[in-house]
Amino acid sequence: MTGSTVVFLGRVLVDSGEGWGTGPARVLIEESLLNVPKDLREVEIDTSAGTSCYYRLKAGERYVVFAARRDGLPVRLRIGGCSNTFPLQGHEHILDALRSKAQGGPSRLVGAVLRSSGAYTHEDGVPGALVVAISPTARYQVLADASGGYEIRDIAPGRYEIEVSKSGFVPDAEYNSRWSGRFELNKATNTWEPDKSEPAGSVLVGERSCQVWDLGMWPRGRISGTVRSNTGSPLGGVTVQAFALDRRGEQESRPLRTGTTDGAGKYLIEPLPGGEYVVGVNAERYRDMEPYPPTVFAGDSRRSTTTHISVTDGQETADIGLTLPAKRTATTLRVTVLAPGGAPYAGAVVSLENLVGVQRWCSKDGTSLEGAAEVPVYVGEQYVVKAWASSSVGGGSGREYFYLGGSSRVDVAAEHPVAVVVLAPRRLRDKY
């Protein structure tokens, strides 16, 4: 926290929402903890709703809010996905520690051990997890309570490395080694900046301070099986992917975990939280990265539909076998993008789709000065090559922006195929 951080217990009167154009939340301040002006009773909070860094504040719920204020005028505050803000229910011990800090009590280290459920998400707590805080001169250990909360009271000031363990779980190394969010004052510019000297994942406990540090643990669920060729031979060195399902029950675009087959074609994917998964090879929704055609587990060679694999926390789902079609031959598609008048178009974005409209590749850089791009493809496949760009005419307030797009179908019958995409105006944007 910096000297401008505002901390209070509040009840949400107006929900922040999650989509574009929603928010801000409106919050009733029930208890001031740090830097809250005496006369402030309600406040609007920008939660970055509609972005990838939003923090949802739900109407009717109570939260301990850590917010930034600007220019010393907390008429509207701001929090984001990296905020220490937390819902009160199940975390009352953290509020108690913050109250102790506000009253000048001894130092505490508090937090919750959370069940990791995705790359950036956590659900519920992990009761009974062992939390150990170690410094060069001190060592403390506690067990998480029934909600996953933990608290070390009267902890000696110093920098601590935090370890967490429990049978059937694996520490979430990426989450637990994150930057703490600690800032330091740059006296030369009189601004608060990230403390770059702070080791990632460590916690600095100061005199009469309250440090909040949550920890994550992956349930050690597992999926195992064997990958074979279409002739029945085991395949080594193949990456097998496990995809979680989204809220609609559909496969996520990127795998949550992967495993690689050994010489006998056997693979193991871990750790995985309990839930339903799609298991496959080269099965990412928007990328075609392997010579093997996209293949997912269907449970029965006579079925073409995907079979979801159920995983239970701490247990193994075994014998999930995959049979892969023959490898494809990789080659390069040479694409030329032309402007509406026929001249080469530099800077256009090029993408590749299969015939059912699923994107399989997209360029990171625009086309060259000659309008050229090289695209990875496979012999025997059929694609639709698309290119798009924006163009403008006029100047100042009279400038008009056009969307340019074009497509071309290509059958990759041999190595080094070529395709030409001619751009055409697709729609007229508003004047600026």
Image: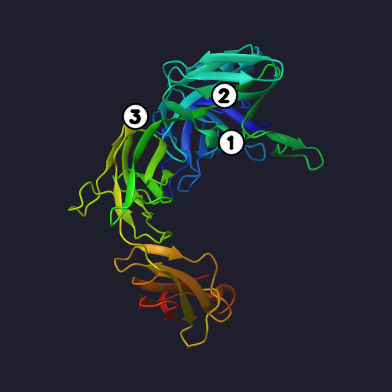
Camera sees residue 82: yes
Residue at horizontal 34 percent and vertical 70 percent from the top: 381
Question: Which residue is labeled 3 in the image?
Answer: 315
Question: Disc 1 or disc 3, which is closer to the eye?
Answer: 3
- Extreme residue in the left direction: 302
Foreground: 177 or 62?
177
State the CA–CA distance, disc 1 to disc 2.
13 Å
Q: Which comes sooner in the sequence, label 2 or label 3?
A: 2
Give the answer, above or below, for where 25 lies relative to 403.
above
> Where is residue 83 drawn, in percent x and y?
55, 35
Residue carrying label 1: 178
Q: Quadrant of residue 34?
A: top right
Identify the image quadrant of residue 249: top left
Say above or below: 40 vs 351: above
Q: Nearer the viewer, mark 2 or mark 3?
A: 3
- The alpha-carbon separation of the residues under discs 1 and 3 comes to 28 Å
